[in-house]
């Protein structure tokens, strides 16, 4: 997103197509509070991935703080998604499928201490494998093999919900990493993610 005050004091908001829904959900607040010089400056900082100073954000009212924080969060996520998908050539690291059906998944989840919106904490996955990864049904080991979490699969078998597991397992194994070694999953993020999800190989 980008923000600009027009000569009639209205706020113009420029958005990329992938940010359209986020804009729609926040449009009224963005236009209402974006008119204010201090808020507009902080919004523009956030969209340039410059973390606004905490004391400046705290000086705003609660609603204005939420607007700045939400724009900052959405910008970081969009940047993370772009970096990860570019690194993997817009292909799932497990299946190699493109078809614009690929997500950028955090290896160490966003809520975990030390997580980062960095390409080395990301992996491109098709939605099914992304959900399975986030749920701990599959995990990435330090050799960059995507593996089934047998403990989770046993729980599903006991619930009679393991149908299709053979087909699901078929593409697992060595992932297709980014060509650039500096963009490949970090061993540290992998270890911490597996500890966080309580996965014991």
Image: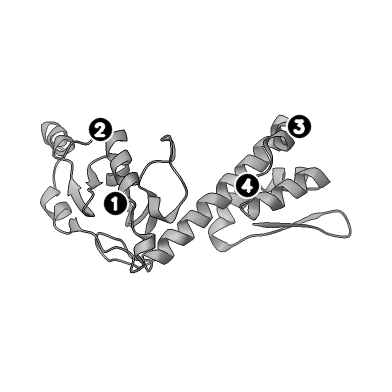
User: Which residue matches tag 4?
Assistant: 71
In primary-sequence order, the first of circles 3 and 4 is: 3
For the residues bearing labels 2 and 4, Cβ distance under 8 angstroms: no
Residue lying at 25% horizontally and 32% vertically, measured from the top left:
198
Residue lying at 74% horizontally and 37% vertically, measured from the top left:
56
For the residues bearing labels 3 and 1, Cβ distance under 8 angstroms: no
Indicate the quadrant where residue 109 lies. Answer: top left
Q: Is residue 125 left or right of residue 15?
A: left
Residue lying at 48% horizontally and 54% vertically, measured from the top left:
80
Residue 198 numbered tag = 2
In primary-sequence order, the first of circles 2 and 1 is: 1
The crowd level at tag 2 (other Cα within 10 Å; few <14, some 14-19, many 20+) is few
Against 82, is 110 above or below?
above
User: Which residue matches tag 3?
Assistant: 59
Distance CA(mark 4)–CA(mark 1): 28 Å
Distance CA(mark 3)–CA(mark 2): 40 Å
Distance CA(mark 3)–CA(mark 1): 42 Å
> What percent of the width, then of the height, locates residue 47?
64, 53
User: Which residue matches tag 1?
Assistant: 128
Against 188, is 156 above or below?
above
In primary-sequence order, the first of circles 2 and 4 is: 4
Q: Quadrant of the C terminus?
A: top left
The crowd level at tag 1 (other Cα within 10 Å; few <14, some 14-19, many 20+) is few
Residue depth check, mark 3 versus mark 4: number of the one nearer the observer: 3
Indicate the quadrant where residue 66 lies. Answer: top right
Distance CA(mark 3)–CA(mark 4): 17 Å
For the residues bearing labels 4 and 1, Cβ distance under 8 angstroms: no
Q: Is residue 170 left or right of residue 78?
A: left
């Amino acid at each position: 997103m980008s923000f600009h005050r027009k000569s009639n004091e209205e706020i113009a908001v420029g958005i990329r197509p992938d940010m359209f829904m986020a804009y729609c959900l926040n449009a009224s607040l963005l236009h209402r509070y974006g008119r204010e010089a201090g808020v507009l400056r902080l919004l523009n900082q956030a969209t340039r991935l410059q973390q606004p100073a905490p004391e400046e954000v705290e000086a705003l009212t609660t609603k204005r703080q939420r607007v700045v924080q939400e724009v900052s969060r959405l910008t970081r996520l969009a940047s993370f998604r772009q970096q990860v998908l570019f690194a993997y050539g817009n292909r799932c690291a497990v299946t190699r499928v493109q078809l614009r059906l690929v997500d950028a998944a955090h290896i160490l989840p966003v809520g975990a201490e030390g997580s980062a919106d960095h390409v080395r904490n990301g992996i491109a996955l098709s939605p099914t494998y992304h959900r399975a990864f986030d749920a701990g049904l599959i995990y990435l080991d330090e050799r960059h093999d995507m593996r089934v979490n047998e403990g989770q699969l046993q729980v599903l078998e006991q619930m009679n919900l393991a149908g299709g597991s053979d087909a699901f397992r078929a593409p697992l194994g060595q992932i297709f990493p980014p060509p650039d070694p500096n963009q490949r999953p970090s061993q540290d993020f992998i270890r911490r993610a597996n500890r966080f999800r309580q996965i014991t190989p």
